[in-house]
Image: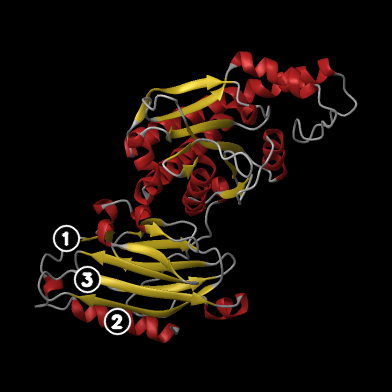
Amino acid sequence: MSRLAAAVLAAALALCAAPGSPASEGRLALARLDAASSFVRDAGGEVVLSLALSRPVPWRAYTLADPPRLVLDFREIDWRGGDPAAILRSDLVTGLRAGTVRPGWSRLVLPLAVPLVIDEAGMETRTGDGSARLGLRLVPASAEAMRAAAGAPDSPMFPALPEAPPPPRGRGALTVALDPGHGGIDPGAEAGGVTEADLMLAFARDLEAALLRAGFRVALTRDADVFVPLDLRITRARAAGADLLLSLHADAVPEGRATGATVFTLSETASEAAAALLAERHDRDDLLSGVDLSAQDDAVAVALMDIARLDTRPRSEALADAIVAGLGAAVGGLHKRPRQSAGFTVLRAADIPSVLIELGFLTTAADRERLLAPEWRRRAAQAIAQAVSAWAAADAERARQARR
């Protein structure tokens, strides 16, 4: 869509709000977003956006480059009708920010993972209740084509609104390592024709999408049904520059009676044993990020890892607490003891806050039914992503206070 076309669309919409039209009734009431009836989703390599609004408003849509993002400006919208971020179902759109850009004007900003340009856009108004629906389609383009099409369309209806800034890098700078448990020759728990390895890889991809939408970078310790030794999982997380690690599992119990999600951190006793065990390894290049322990004896290596854990242990505990709270609020079904600690090998990275999430018990029918439901996995993934976002903000503030 050209800049002229965008301006024409905005102007045409203004006529919908003329006196005597349904949109002119209740002029003082802000338009509201119906999040439950709205979506942003992928369609092949394209992105389709559909926003349900309580009434039509003047609007415009345009893209910006470096970094690529879609911007929609509106006459003011009341975003309290639902969480705008909940409409996001796209891997090509990595986030969604909504708010007031200046008094009387609202904006949606959607960072894009790849260059895209607007191909179709329009708003329809329902004659019955005066509600409206904005539809928009983004199609792939080269980086050069996106730069050429970038910029807000000229329109006398829109005042000089501030330019949409690029996404903040505070959260986006963080890399989350996702560790889908088991794989390959180690299928993990098995029940009902399902293996823990396959199910956790599927959930890791759901969670990856949710974290990308929240502005994080994501690395998987395995992205196929392959066996990865436990120590190598930590190595891969560190090689990816991980700022935190989430290990994903669905446990088994012989009697099939236990139920609910549990989040584990490394226990203090296990931490001491882990430091001693890791120090015995000959290849020490990934025990601590940025610290060469190859020439150090075991006592020095243990001491340095213990010092590192003085910082990472409380951060891991806070991360686990945030995830338990998020899952409990969003999907419920927590274990009767949802916060535990144990000596899991994958949690032994001394310098990376790490937690192990047991999403449920695969051998328990109720848990298995939830884990196999795509909608439950999506809500659980969104809850974990939101919990990580909250933890990241609190963790950054804690670090800022510590520097004072």
Q: Are the residues tagged 1 and 3 within 8 Å (C-beta)?
A: no
Q: Alpha-carbon distance for marks 1 and 2?
A: 21 Å
Q: Position of residue 251 (x, y in %)?
A: 48, 31
**Comparing marks 1 and 3, which lies closer to the viewer?**
3
11 to 266, vertically: above or below: below
Structural crowding at the residue carrying mark 1, measured as other residues with C-alpha within 10 Å and reported as few (<14), some (14–19) or many (≥20): few
Mark 2 falls on what kind of element?
A: helix
Q: Is residue 236 left or right of residue 102?
A: right
* Residue beneath the point at 32% across and 34% down: 332
Any part of residue 301 in sight: yes
Which label sits on residue 29?
Answer: 1
Q: Residues within 10 Å of mark 2 (few under 14, many from 20)?
A: some
From mark 3 to mark 2, how far is it between C-alphas?
16 Å
Q: Position of residue 134 (x, y in %)?
A: 30, 72
Q: Which quarter of the image is occupied by the C terminus? A: top right
The mark found on residue 132 in the picture is 3
Is 208 situated above or below 258?
A: below
**Three-letter amino acid code at the position of disc 1:** Ala
| Left-right relation of 246 to 37 | right
Q: Which tag, 1 or 2, sits closer to the chain's start?
A: 2
Q: Secondary structure at mark 3?
A: strand
Q: Nearer the viewer, residue 301 or 18?
A: 301
Name the N-terminal-most of marks 1 and 3: 1
Work out whether residue 240 or residue 26 is closer to the camera in this orientation and state it: 240
Count how many numbered circles sit on residues in the image: 3
Q: Earlier in the sequence, mark 3 or mark 2?
A: 2
Tell me: residue 25, above or below residue 11.
Answer: above
Is disc 1 placed on a helix, strand or loop? loop
Residue located beneath label 2 in the image: 11
